[in-house]
């Protein structure tokens, strides 16, 4: 496979394909890569219609729109026929909603993950990458717990592929996505547009990891070329102080401290100390190796070290408050404005 074009001539299916990540990913692979076909798998016919109408690229001759829910294994089996690669982006994500509707989140985020694993094995898919979140590391809310369970299911899926060695299942874990649907930036921008002079901040100490949609899409594409199966890939993305975001979006607005909501952390975590013991570092990303290795073809700590990874120091933690890459107010402002290159400064 050509590492520079891992998706060339592949049939790619994206669950949750009408979401923010799905649209960015699909736009990118159609304009910068050359897939044979792209399947948008999602449960909302209106969102599929709106996506197709929103831009000529989403009415491309290579796109197929497939209605279905990841809760429905039979529908996944039909959708996965002759598919090479799957990106599993479908999930319920709102933390407060998860606390009130736990069973619905379990059905989609956990049972749905089980169905994707089973359907991919039964339909001989080559590779599957599931999207995760920093909230899955040492979770304190139900959403994070369901995503941790999902991560474990995809890593363990490699145990069931048999002698054929496929599909390979891996996970990509990253932090807050700039401009994604329901995220803080568009909400605050709307408040400012409506004349707000204060913006709600839960706690002045709060920090978060930050990544743009194109960066997230590129990271997934790159990992299709490098994945061995069983890894959790974690990009080295910068942190920002949430209170700095107020100055970046509305310099004349004041932060209004409202207190941490149920299920929130002051600082997010991507690699905890226990995971760090079986993780390695590359120049622009970390990889968490599976603790249980089921075959010689899977990723393992030893294999990752052999291909250039470096061990992490004892006690290493990758959290949003202990990061060595930070976004200034100016960098945040440039990022929000759509600057193609935003350089994170070292230190606080």
Image: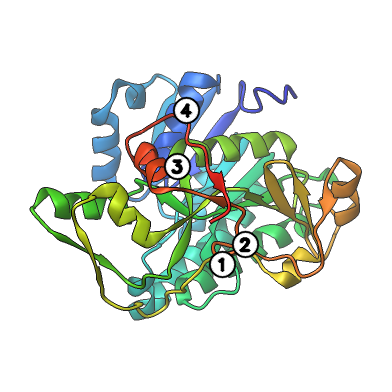
Q: Is 99 positioned to the left or the right of 53 in the image?
A: right
Q: Which residue is under mark 4? A: 28
Residue depicted at x 42% and y 35%: 24
Disc 1 secondary structure class: helix
Check whether the beta carbons of the residues at disc 4 and disc 1 lie within 8 A of each other.
no
Check whether the beta carbons of the residues at disc 2 and disc 3 lie within 8 A of each other.
no
Check whether the beta carbons of the residues at disc 2 and disc 1 lie within 8 A of each other.
yes
The x and y percentages for residue 204 are 37, 70
Which circle's residue, 2 or 3, is located before the other in the chain? 2
Cα gap from disc 3 to disc 4, whole angstroms: 13 Å
Check whether the beta carbons of the residues at disc 4 and disc 2 lie within 8 A of each other.
no
Dot 4 surroundings within 10 Å: few (below 14), some, or many (20 or more)?
Answer: some
Between circles 3 and 4, the one closer to the viewer is 3
Cα gap from disc 2 to disc 3, whole angstroms: 22 Å
Cα gap from disc 1 to disc 3, whole angstroms: 19 Å
Q: Which residue is under mark 1? A: 136
From this view, report whether residue 5 is shown above or below residue 26: above
Q: Is 36 positioned to the left or the right of 181 in the image?
A: right
Q: Is 156 positioned to the left or the right of 99 in the image?
A: right
Residue depicted at x 83% and y 65%: 292
The x and y percentages for residue 144 are 51, 70
Disc 4 secondary structure class: helix
The x and y percentages for residue 77 are 55, 48
Between circles 1 and 3, the one closer to the viewer is 3
* Residue 337 in view in this figure: yes
């Amino acid at each position: 496979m050509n590492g520079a074009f891992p998706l060339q001539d592949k049939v790619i299916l994206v669950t949750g394909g009408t979401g923010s990540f799905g649209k960015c990913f699909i736009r990118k692979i159609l304009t910068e890569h050359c897939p044979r076909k792209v399947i948008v798998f999602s449960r909302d016919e209106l969102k599929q219609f709106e996506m197709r109408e929103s831009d000529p690229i989403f009415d491309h001759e290579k796109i197929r729109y497939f209605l279905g829910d990841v809760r429905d294994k039979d529908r996944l089996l039909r959708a996965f026929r002759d598919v090479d690669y799957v990106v599993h982006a479908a999930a319920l994500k709102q933390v407060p909603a998860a606390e009130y509707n736990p069973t619905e989140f379990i059905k989609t985020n956990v049972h749905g993950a089980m169905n994707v694993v089973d359907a991919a094995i039964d339909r001989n898919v080559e590779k599957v990458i599931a999207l995760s979140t920093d909230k899955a590391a040492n979770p304190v809310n139900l959403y994070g717990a369901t995503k941790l369970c999902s991560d474990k299911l995809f890593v363990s899926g490699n145990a069931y592929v048999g002698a054929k060695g496929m599909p390979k299942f891996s996970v990509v874990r990253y932090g807050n996505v700039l401009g994604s649907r329901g995220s803080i930036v568009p909400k605050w921008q709307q408040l400012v547009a409506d004349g707000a002079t204060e913006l709600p901040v839960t706690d002045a100490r709060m920090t978060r990891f930050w990544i743009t949609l194109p960066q997230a899409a590129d990271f997934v594409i790159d990992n299709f070329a490098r994945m061995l199966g069983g890894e959790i890939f974690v990009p080295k993305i910068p942190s920002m102080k949430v209170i700095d975001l107020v100055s970046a979006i509305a310099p004349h607005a004041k932060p209004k401290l409202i207190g941490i909501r149920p299920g929130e952390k002051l600082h997010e975590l991507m690699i905890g100390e226990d995971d760090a013991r079986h993780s390695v570092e590359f120049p622009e990303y970390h990889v968490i190796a599976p603790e249980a290795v089921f075959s010689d073809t899977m990723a393992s700590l030893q294999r990752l070290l052999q291909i250039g990874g470096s061990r992490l120091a004892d006690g290493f933690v990758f959290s949003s408050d202990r990061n060595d890459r930070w976004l200034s107010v100016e960098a945040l402002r440039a990022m929000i404005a759509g600057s193609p290159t935003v350089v994170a400064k070292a230190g606080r």
